[in-house]
Image (spheres, rainbow, N blue to C red):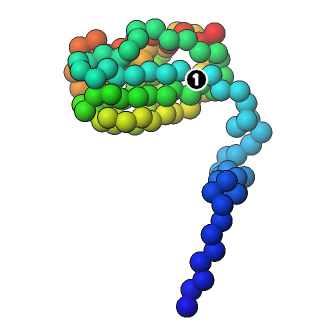
Amino acid sequence: MRKLFLVPLAIAAASVAAFAPGASAKSHAPISVVHLTAVKTGLAYNTKTASAKAGRVKIVFTNLSPLHHNVKLEQGEKEFGGTKTIATGATSVILSLKKGVYHFYCSVPGHEDAGMSGSLTVS
């Protein structure tokens, strides 16, 4: 017979975080949060411009549409990453960004060309 031990969620989460690969004091640095939303109908975000502080930037993406969308970030030809592609729901990603102007866009074919893009100014 197997015995099950229940551990409170807060203790379990703290234990996992303490032993996560790459965990360091740096992971506790302040994070600038940017919220972007895909509108319910059409191919657009709720804004064409956003801003954040240099360093760790969390992009919180909410998709109100049943169509699949994401948020990708680039500067010139250099890709910096982005969120997962999702239908209705929310997802996020944390990126390390230096000062500058970045282009955000939806990488689903045809969406950026239809205007699903904008600029993120990091200061």
Residue 97, image x, y percentages: 60, 21
Quadrant in which residue 100 is drawn: top right
Quadrant of residue 41 within the rendered picture: top left
Tell me the residue at 30%/36% (across/down).
87
Q: Is residue 12 left or right of residue 87?
A: right
Name, please, the residue furthest toward the right.
Answer: 25
* 115 shown above or below 39: above
| Residue at 42% in and 18% down | 104
Task: Bin the neighbour count of mark 1 within 10 Å (Cα to Cα): few under 14, some 14-19, many 20 and up.
Answer: some
Residue 85 visible, this orientation: yes
In percent of width and height, residue 113 lies at 25, 14
Q: Secondary structure at mark 1?
A: strand
For the N terminus, the quadrant is: bottom right
What amino acid type is highlighted by mark number 1? Val
- Can you tell which quarter of the image residue 16 is in? bottom right
Residue 62 horizontal/vertical position (percent): 41, 28
Name which residue lies at 49% across and 22% down.
35
Q: Nearer the viewer, residue 54 or 37?
A: 37
Residue 14 drawn above or below residue 26: below
Does 16 sit above or below residue 97? below
Which residue is pictured at 46% across the width and 8% down the height?
49
**Image quadrant containing the C terminus:** top right
Q: Is residue 42 left or right of residue 119?
A: left
The residue beneath circle 1 is 33
Report if residue 81 is visible in the image. no
Residue 3: x %, y % from top left: 60, 83
For residue 116, side relative to residue 48 (left or right): left
